[in-house]
Each structure stands twice: as C-alpha cells, then as structure tokens.
C-alpha cells in the first residue's frame, strides 16, 4: 500500500482511541451473547425433558422456535455495537481515503440504478444491501454499495403455494460517471458460453434477443473473457476503445472474480461478485488490531482505484 | 415420392437461408461504410470553427492554417476520386496534428475555453472515426467469412459476391509524426 505510513499514523492518532472504547463494548456484547447461548440451550434442554412425548411434532416446532429466538436475540444485542463500529471506524477510514467520500452504513445504491444497468435479466424481487459510499474522485463522481439481489420462484397452487428466493447477485455494485458521451446501451458480460462451447457458443450468444446485438471485438483475449452486447456497433466500439478493453482485462485479473459492466446513460455500472461481507466488525477477538483494520482499507482502496484502473479521469473528449 | 418433396423443400429452405444471410452481411458492410462517411463529415465540419478560433492567436502559423482550410474545401467539394479520398484524408489528419503541435507555443490559446471545447470535440470525432472503421472491418470480416466458408461460398459464387478489402491504416499514418519534422518544413 502506497500510503502505508500515512495510514499507520492515522490509525494511531485517529482510530486507536475509538477502537479501544468499541472494544470495551465488544466485551460486553461477548458476555451477553454467551449468556443468551447458555440460556437458550438450557431452555431447550428443559423443553426436551418436560414436554410430553405424545406431542412430538409440536415439540420439534417449540425447540426450533426457541433456537431461532436465541439467534434473533444475539443479532439484536450486537446490532448497536456493529453499527457503532461502522459509523465511527469505517466512516473515518472513508474520509481518510478521500475527503469527498461520504459513508452510510445502512444505505445502498438505489434499486432503480441497479435495474437501469440491465446487467441481470432476472426480475429483482428482493433487493438488500449496506455500506453505501459516494463522492467524487478528481473529476469522476462515484457511488457504490454491497448488494444482494434475489428473484422469486413460486411453485404449487392455492394453499400449497411456496415461494422460493434465489440469489442471483451478491457483491459490490459500483456506479461511475463515464468520460465519454454516448446515447445507446452497451453490456460487457462474463463469457461463459464461449468458454464452454467455443465457436458454437458464440453462435448461441448471437441469438440472445433482449440484450441487443452481439458485438465482436478485435482483442482475442477480451473476447475470450467477455461477451459484448450493444444497440449500436459503432458506439459500442467508441466506448470500448482498445485501451479500455485492456484495462478491463487487467481489472478483472486484479479482482479475480466475476465482473459485469454496463454502459448506460453516460455512466458505467460495474457489478463485482464477492462472497465476503466487507466493512464488518467481529466478536470474541480484539478489534484493536492493525491488520484487521487494514483489511477494510485495502478493499476500500481497491474500489476507489477503479476510477484510475479504467482511466475515467482522462477527460480529453467533449465531456468534462 | 413424398421423400423427394420433403428433400426439395429442405433444400429450398437452406438455399433461401444462405442467400438471406449473405445479403444481410453485404448490407452490414455498406451500412458501416456509410457510418464512416458520416463521421468524416463531422470531422470536416469542425475545421472552419477551429481555424477561426486559432487564427487570432497563431499569427505566425498562417501557412499551416491556410493549408488546412484548403484541404478541407477539397474534401467537402465532392470532386475527388475514390482512391484520392484516403490520401486527402491522411493529409488533413497530418495537417491537423501540425496545428495541435503548434498550439503548444501559445499558452493563451491553450487556456482558451473555446479552443479547449473544440479540442475535446476533435478528439471525440477522431475516436468515433476510429470506432466506425473498426465496425467496418468487423462487418467486412464477417462478410468475407460468409463468402469464403462452405457452404455459403457456393451461394456467393452464384450471386457473384466478391471479397472486400479491410480498411487499412496507410504506412504514413502509422509512423508517429515527428514534431521536429513538422517545424522544419
């Protein structure tokens, strides 16, 4: 990390005292959690012994509900502590990385923006997220947050109707001002078909109607990794210059996960699949730990660096 | 008997499919060629404005500007042959590059809002022309593939479709323009 020494100073001067106070809170929460766990186990044991056996089906339900209540209590009792960590520590780290950045622990990028990006074709039936950060890096306005999006499937009819939610995206959703003007929509999606089926896969891809025309670009490595759809052949190439294609490839290698991009309305939307839940605190282990805090900064920097990675501050065209 | 009819029908479908696919590819090529033309026109349209803005400041570069204006007039007059067009276009690009290099010596001009906007528009048009050329090459490659692969090559032969040339950057443009070279002219 380039500003390692700077961050170490910041850590010692700005964060340490808050962390120590929060750690005290953590210890209280730890005790509460242990208490809840023990109580729940005891209650379950009592229920097991004293509920008569002839109503075994009800017994199962009662035990399950008790367990569930225990879990809920645990998460409730640690909620304040978790939020405090976010607003105090993560909030400060965000301002340290760039003064223009604001942090909302429970905010998200709007669902409308997510749908506008048209990256995913599933219907967005359940949309949740946290850790919303927005600001301006030099000339580029950015915003991003963690998002989990699910679609609904129903099976059965009438009283036996069951609804099942499937997660189709979990990770970071990032929106930035793009450095060129354009009117149509272009999508850059991970190329699964070509990897599996080769040339035949390309033929299958060209049949996907709702996403626009298949755009075949000149960079073979880019073509192997991504599949591009767009409404206009020329504008798609105007956006995806040879240098931007190379940068996107580097960006994918850097993150080493599934990347989806979409260019709509003079903005670029990036969805990065990520299993890890970022900017979270922990229980039962001290948080006055430099490497633990550094992890958070590392991810924040990676995200802010996207502007550099895609050279979005290069404003030599008609857009300022 | 019925097998013959089915076979003939299938054959007809295949032939129609091949014919249509080739026609579509040919039209894609013509369409993308027209796009390049449209972008080039945009480029020519920027030149008068640019010359006006720059003229007042760059009093010592009169010859450069006159050359650019003349080249542009020739380009929009429509009196040049197909082959000469590429040549003319290259000359315009080179001349423009010369002007941009000369601007470096005029800090007042470099800071001028009008000029900066024009420069942005120029870069945009250049990038769009490049995109249009890439789209053209993609369309031509697709068309050539259709003409040369089996079985559509048989159909292409019947329709007398010929292979088309890709848009190539001439050697001149490929060599980086040496700044000192321009000043020594």
Image (cartoon, coloured by chain):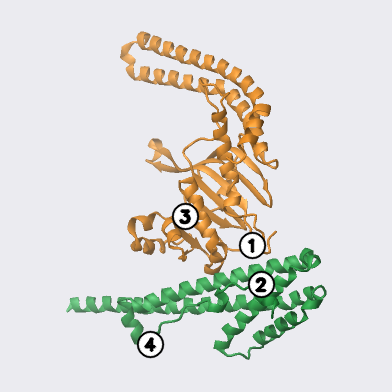
Chain colours: A orange, B green
For the N terminus of chain A, the image quarter is top right
Q: Quadrant of residue A145?
A: top right
Residue that mark 3 sits on: A189
Q: In whole angstroms, how far apart are the C-alphas of marks 4 and 3? A: 38 Å
Tell me whether circle 2 and circle 3 mark residues in contact (CB < 8 Å): no
Callouts 1 and 3 in the same chain: yes
Q: Which label sits on residue A13?
A: none
Residue at the image point whose x is 42% and y is 10% from the top: A42
Q: Which residue is mark 2?
A: B179
Q: Which residue is mark 1?
A: A181
Q: Position of residue A159 (x, y in %)?
A: 40, 35
Q: Earlier in the sequence, mark 2 or mark 4?
A: 4
Q: CA distance from mark 1 to mark 3?
A: 21 Å
Q: CA distance from mark 2 to mark 1?
A: 31 Å
- Alpha carbons under labels 1 and 4: distance apart: 41 Å
Crowd class of label 2 (few under 14; some 14 to 19; many from 20; radius 10 Å):
few
Instruction: Judge by depth and name the residue closer to the eye, A108 or A227.
Output: A227
Is residue B44 visible in this depiction of the protein? Answer: yes
Residue B38 position, x and y percent, is 60, 77
- Looking at the rendered structure, whether the residues under marks 2 and 3 are on a common chain is answered as no
Left-right relation of A240 to A194: right
Using the rendered image, report if marks 2 and 1 lie on a common chain.
no
- Chain letter behind tag 3: A
Helix, strand or loop at disc 1? Answer: loop
Q: Which residue is mark 4?
A: B160
């Amino acid at each position: 990390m380039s500003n390692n020494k700077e961050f170490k100073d910041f850590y010692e001067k700005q964060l340490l005292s808050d962390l120590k106070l929060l750690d005290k809170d953590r210890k209280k929460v730890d005790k509460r959690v242990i208490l809840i766990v023990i109580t729940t186990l005891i209650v379950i044991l009592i229920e097991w012994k004293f509920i008569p056996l002839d109503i075994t089906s009800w017994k199962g339900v009662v035990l399950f509900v008790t367990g569930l209540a225990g879990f809920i209590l645990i998460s409730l009792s640690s909620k304040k502590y978790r939020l405090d960590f976010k607003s105090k520590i993560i909030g400060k780290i965000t301002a340290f990385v760039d003064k223009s950045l604001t942090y909302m622990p429970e905010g998200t990028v709007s669902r409308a923006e997510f749908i506008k990006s048209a990256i995913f074709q599933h219907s967005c039936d359940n949309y949740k997220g946290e850790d919303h950060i927005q600001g301006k890096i030099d000339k580029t306005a950015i915003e991003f947050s963690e998002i989990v999006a699910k679609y609904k499937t129903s099976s059965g009819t009438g009283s036996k109707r069951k609804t099942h939610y499937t997660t189709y995206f979990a990770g970071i959703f990032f929106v930035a001002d793009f450095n060129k003007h354009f009117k149509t929509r272009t999508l850059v999606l991970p190329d699964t078909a070509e990897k599996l089926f080769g040339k035949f896969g390309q033929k299958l891809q060209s049949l996907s109607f709702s996403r626009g025309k298949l755009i075949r670009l000149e960079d073979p490595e880019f073509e192997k990794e991504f599949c591009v759809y767009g409404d206009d052949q020329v504008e798609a190439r105007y956006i995806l210059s040879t240098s931007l294609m190379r940068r996107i490839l580097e960006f994918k290698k850097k993150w080493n996960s599934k990347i989806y991009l979409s260019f709509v309305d003079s903005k670029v939307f990036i969805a990065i699949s990520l299993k890890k839940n970022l900017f979270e605190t922990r229980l039962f282990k001290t948080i006055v730990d430099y490497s633990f805090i550094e992890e958070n900064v590392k991810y924040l920097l990676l995200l802010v660096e996207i502007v550099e990675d895609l050279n979005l501050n290069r404003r030599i065209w008609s857009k300022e | 008997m019925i097998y013959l009819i089915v076979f003939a029908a299938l054959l007809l479908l295949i032939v129609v499919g091949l014919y249509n696919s080739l026609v579509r590819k040919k039209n894609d090529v013509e369409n993308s060629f027209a796009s390049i033309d449209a972008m080039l026109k945009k480029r020519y349209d920027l030149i008068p404005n640019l010359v006006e803005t720059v003229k007042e400041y760059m009093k010592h570069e009169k010859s450069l500007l006159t050359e650019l204006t003349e080249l542009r007039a020739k380009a929009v007059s429509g009196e040049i042959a197909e082959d000469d067009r590429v040549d003319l276009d290259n000359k315009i690009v080179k001349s423009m590059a010369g002007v941009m290099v000369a601007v470096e010596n005029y800090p007042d001009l470099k800071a001028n809002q009008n000029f900066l906007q024009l420069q942005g528009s120029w870069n945009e048009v250049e990038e769009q022309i490049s995109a249009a050329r890439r789209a053209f090459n993609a369309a031509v490659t697709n068309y050539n593939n259709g003409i040369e692969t089996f079985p559509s090559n048989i159909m292409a032969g019947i329709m007398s479709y010929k292979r088309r040339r890709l848009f190539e950057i001439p050697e001149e443009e490929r060599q980086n323009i040496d700044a000192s070279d321009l000043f020594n002219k």
